[in-house]
Image: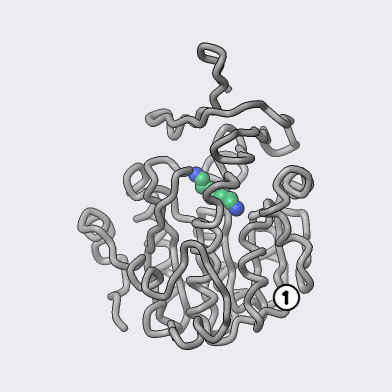
């Protein structure tokens, strides 16, 4: 946090090459957990803000963008998602969206840092409400170890991780995705937060190459928010059977009666249409967009 002319700012420096900041009114909470530095800021414009190791995770103002897009794109692609696993996502926002789907019977959250869950419950009520929905199980532990050891199967797995530094690094590795593939049902789908197409093109290529070892269908899709460096942000999508465009049934979205602030079926489709620089970067690694 920086103080300039009596203004307080919460700044994020991303990869040591890009800095952005929010004017805040106070540092509401700060602690070093066993895994990372956890801070909560109050602000007039953005509501509560949570950072982990100085990386901005979520703000009250625009959390809906990320949480709707990580959840509804795969859940409306899968014809009947019943069992959903969220790795990370201790703030509860992803689960909040997952549990709105009437077919979902289990939403299991495996978050390594219990303090993220507890602090979110205390400071981010609007987001963490997802942690208390019927059908939710919250397990604090290592997601890598969980997928290695579990005998449970899931229809959809969502990797709602922090950036690939520190504690989240193994969630961007091949061994992890081999296990994710093993615990997915025969028509399962995995979506992971996929970082910035502007700043981390090599990471996106590396991740698609890993997914290509296990999954016949691989895509990137984009969203745009205020909070993540550069605004444009990607998700990795990999599937054993269902294509994110052919699988989307707009009548089902309508019949669900769910209302959204960012997601629409048209946006679901459009988010898979990538700018030329991303297509060039990922040439040969993406499945064709059809449907
Ligand atoms: N650069 C930020 C990427 C963080 C993605 N996860 C955010 C957690 C919100 N549930």
**Residue 272 visible here:** yes
Q: Is residue 191 left or right of residue 231?
A: right
How far across and down, in percent of the image, does residue 275 sit? 24, 58
How far across and down, in percent of the image, does residue 95 sit? 66, 64
Say if 291 sits above or below 51 in the image.
below
Say if 185 sits above or below 129 in the image.
below
Closer to the camera, 169 or 117? 117
Instruction: Tell me the residue at 39%/50% (across/down).
Output: 203
Instruction: Tell me the residue at 67%/77% (across/down).
Output: 83
Badge 1 element: strand
How far across and down, in percent of the image, does residue 147 sit? 66, 65
Colour scheme? one colour
**Residue 170 visible here:** no
Instruction: Tell me the residue at 66%/81% (across/down).
Output: 102
Q: Quadrant of the N terminus?
A: top right
Give the residue pinned by disc 1: 106
Q: Quadrant of the C terminus?
A: bottom left
């Amino acid at each position: 946090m920086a103080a300039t002319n009596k203004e307080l700012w919460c700044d994020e420096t991303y990869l040591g090459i890009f800095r952005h900041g929010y004017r805040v009114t106070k540092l509401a909470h700060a602690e070093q957990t066993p895994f990372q530095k956890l801070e909560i800021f109050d602000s007039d414009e953005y509501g509560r803000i949570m950072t982990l190791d100085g990386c901005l995770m979520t703000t009250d103002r625009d959390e809906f963008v990320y949480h709707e897009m990580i959840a509804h794109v795969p859940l409306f692609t899968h014809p009947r998602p019943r069992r959903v696993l969220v790795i990370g996502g201790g703030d509860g926002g992803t689960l909040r969206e997952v549990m709105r789907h009437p077919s979902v019977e289990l939403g299991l959250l495996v978050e390594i840092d219990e303090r993220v869950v507890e602090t979110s419950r205390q400071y981010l009520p609007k987001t963490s409400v997802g942690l208390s929905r019927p059908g939710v199980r919250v397990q604090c532990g290592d997601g890598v170890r969980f997928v290695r050891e579990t005998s449970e199967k899931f229809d959809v797995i969502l990797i709602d991780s922090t950036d690939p530094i520190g504690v989240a690094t193994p969630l961007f590795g091949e061994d992890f995705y081999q296990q994710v593939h093993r615990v997915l049902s025969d028509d399962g789908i995995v979506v992971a937060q996929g970082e910035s197409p502007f700043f981390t093109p090599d990471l996106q290529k590396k991740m698609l190459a890993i997914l290509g070892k296990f999954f016949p269908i691989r895509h990137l899709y984009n969203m745009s928010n205020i909070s993540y460096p550069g605004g444009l942000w990607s998700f990795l999508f990999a599937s054993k059977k269902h294509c994110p465009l052919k699988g989307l049934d707009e009548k089902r979205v309508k019949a669900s009666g769910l209302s959204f602030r960012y997601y629409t079926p048209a946006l679901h489709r459009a988010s898979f249409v990538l700018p030329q620089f991303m297509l060039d970067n990922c040439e040969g690694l993406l499945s064709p967009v059809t449907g």
